[in-house]
Amino acid sequence: MVCGRCQWRVVGSVVMETRTEDVGVAARPASLSPSRASDFMQCPLLYRFRVIDKLPEKPSPAATRGTLVHAVLERLFDAPSAERTAPRAKELIPGQWDRLREAKPELAALFAPDGADGTDAPDEDGAAARLAQWLADAEKLVERWFTLEDPTRLEPAERELFVEAELASGLKLRGIIDRVDVAPTGEVRIVDYKTGKAPRPEYAEGALFQMKFYALVVWRLKGLIPRRLQLVYLGSGDIITYDPVAADLERVERKLLALWDAIVLATETGNWRPRPTKLCGWCDHQAVCPEFGGTPPPYPLPVRPPESPGDEQGRMGPS
């Protein structure tokens, strides 16, 4: 489907195309997703490490558990309505974990015996116990979902929906939406599952950024504004909802355009500044970060000198 300002692109529940950012070769950024936009706002140098340099990162148990839970909730809707029960959902966990490990063999290292007892012998029992606890935690998250939503009364229009829109400016926005519900009246609800806890009210706006991003993409693709955005927090058992309006999404669009201008400028000049925060403690790239005494790898793209003293990366313009 093609509209005047954008093009709708969906490939079921799996993205089948090969995208530039998925290939381990340095290349200029070609599109923006919610996660990469958040990376740049958090720390431009982190964005560079992930998008330009494509430095490897170790899988984390928390992020992998989130991927597993998402897969289980997606697959549950393959079953008839009456069979979408908590026991059925928990039965899906081992199989989905096997599928994840097949797709990403490096995940097996998360629970590999590591000699944690201080001897040379692998800690087989400890590894098994860690895996069992991890799977039990995933079960709890899945079970909690049933206290927040009733899947027997839901028939999603889309699950794990890959969308891509090109704005009038040429900027491509893309992402994967966990679930899209469409009411008989045609109203659209975008739903995203979070396996962590809901943020405090003063941080709710940041949490909604991703959802507004998706709402903007749907608006530009379909010409309609989603009726509701819904964040389902399985870690704390909370639901945050927001009903977007055109003026709000237009502000998001202006922010993304300014953000993209800053990314393009940093790409051209090679000037990616670190932005230290408390999140640095969880970063995989401390060894090559100047804030920790490291040196970034040689910049793999051609650069140009700044045109003027005010020509600096990191400017985001009005939001």
Image (cartoon, helix red, strand yellow):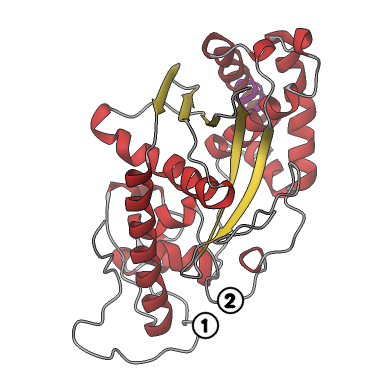
Q: Nearer the viewer, residue 108 or 259?
A: 259
Residue 301 percent location from the top left of the image: 51, 84
Within 10 Å of disc 2 (Cα), the crowding (few <14, some 14-19, many 20+) is some
User: Mark 2–mark 1 contact, CB under 8 Å?
Assistant: yes
Q: Nearer the viewer, residue 62 or 286?
A: 62
The relative height of residue 37 versus residue 209 in the rendered view (above or below) is below
Q: Relative to residue 98, is residue 201 drawn left or right?
A: left
Residue 20 percent location from the top left of the image: 65, 69
The relative height of residue 40 versus residue 282 in the rendered view (above or below) is below
Q: Relative to residue 78, is residue 145 drawn left or right?
A: left
Which segment is the magenta one? Answer: 130-135
Provide the residue designation for mark 2.
Answer: 26
Provide the residue designation for mark 1.
Answer: 300
Within 10 Å of disc 1 (Cα), the crowding (few <14, some 14-19, many 20+) is few
The relative height of residue 317 versus residue 139 in the rendered view (above or below) is below
Q: Secondary structure at mark 1?
A: loop
| Residue type indicated by callout 2 | Ala
Residue 241 falls within the magenta-colored stretch: no
| Residue type indicated by callout 1 | Pro
First in residue order: circle 2 vs circle 1? 2
Q: What's the CA distance linking mark 2 and mark 1?
A: 6 Å
Q: Residue furthest left?
A: 309
Can residue 152 be spotted in the picture?
A: yes
Q: Nearer the viewer, residue 93 or 317?
A: 317
